Amino acid sequence: MVVGETISQGRDYRPSLFTVVIKTLSYQPIAGNSRWYNPLRCVRPLRGNFLLPIGTANAVGLTNPGYRWWCEKVAPSVDFSWQRLVGSVSPEGSTVDQFAEMVSRLSQFRFVALEINPFCPNVTGYSAEKVVEYTKAAKEATPKPLIFKVSAAQDVSAIIPKVEGKIEAISINAVPWKLAFPEERSPLAHLDGGAVSGKPAQKRNWNLLQWIRVISPDIPVIGPDIWEYQDIARLEELGASASSFGAL
């Protein structure tokens, strides 16, 4: 699976090779931190030995123009027949009823599944009880399979068992900078540090994957943070049912 905006809108790679997760949408537009004229304001490459890239830090913050805009301006030009697309939705800024409305509307398109993204590390987030309420509403609003996106910053043991039977798979978000590098200052400190993906996130997220397999062994988990080819094999060994790369 390819998530975020990692295949250059199909210019550099054939989207038909992957299942592509679109940028997360919300009920109302969210300005977030991303600005077209200054992308490095909220996204920074991370480098390791010999300045080789090892991942990214981002504090995009769910920047999006709202789901209605996507339905009216983007969806009509999308050819669902030659690419497998997963819609992604956040409850940020919406009531439970509004979230269900958004899920229902997006279900009219030929997405192969919908992803619920309640734990973006660059927004406020919700209590476990509220997340369960949103997930139940989404399940009632769509016949599509639901992918539930979790974060290493949350206590998944208190959440996942309560949404079993309502979701078909679990995906894993970027790791907050303060968890990945507790002793280091983030290059995005002006935006509360942001979150990291790629190699720096592997230890936290892959441990989380293993823990999810323990508490919910029957739910497929999409392994995150592929950076090298051998990472795919490693994720399979850890119990992942699929793999993903990219997490902006």
Image (cartoon, rainbow, N blue to C red):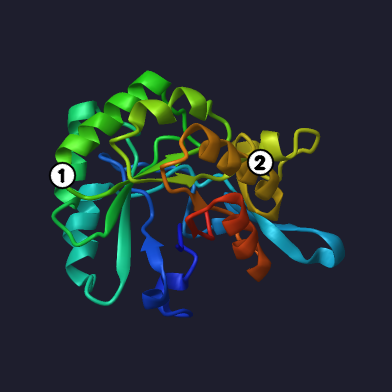
Q: Give how far across and how far down residue 234 sits, in percent.
A: 65, 59
> What residue lies at 43% left-to-right and 48% top-to-bottom?
220
Give whichever of 126, 171 is nearer the camera.
Answer: 171
Q: Say whether residue 68 is visible.
A: yes
Give whichever of 191, 49 is nearer the camera.
Answer: 49
Circle nearer the N terminus (2, 1): 1
Could you tell me if the residues under marks 2 and 1 are in contact, i.e. CB atoms within 8 Å? no
Identify the element where label 2 is drawn.
helix
Q: In which quadrant of the rendered image does the N terminus lie?
A: bottom left
Name the side, left or right, on which 95 lies relative to 23.
left
> What residue lies at 67% left-to-right and 67% top-to-bottom?
230
Q: Give how far across and how far down residue 61 sits, in percent.
A: 47, 42
> Tag 1: residue type?
Ser
Instruction: From the image, tell me which residue sits under label 1.
Output: 104
10 Å crowding of disc 1: few (<14), some (14-19), many (20+): some
> Tag 2: residue type?
Arg
Name the side, left or right, on which 241 lies relative to 72.
right
Which of discs 2 and 1 lies nearer the camera? The answer is: 2
> What residue lies at 47% left-to-right and 22% top-to-bottom?
158
Instruction: From the image, tell me which residue sits under label 2.
Output: 204
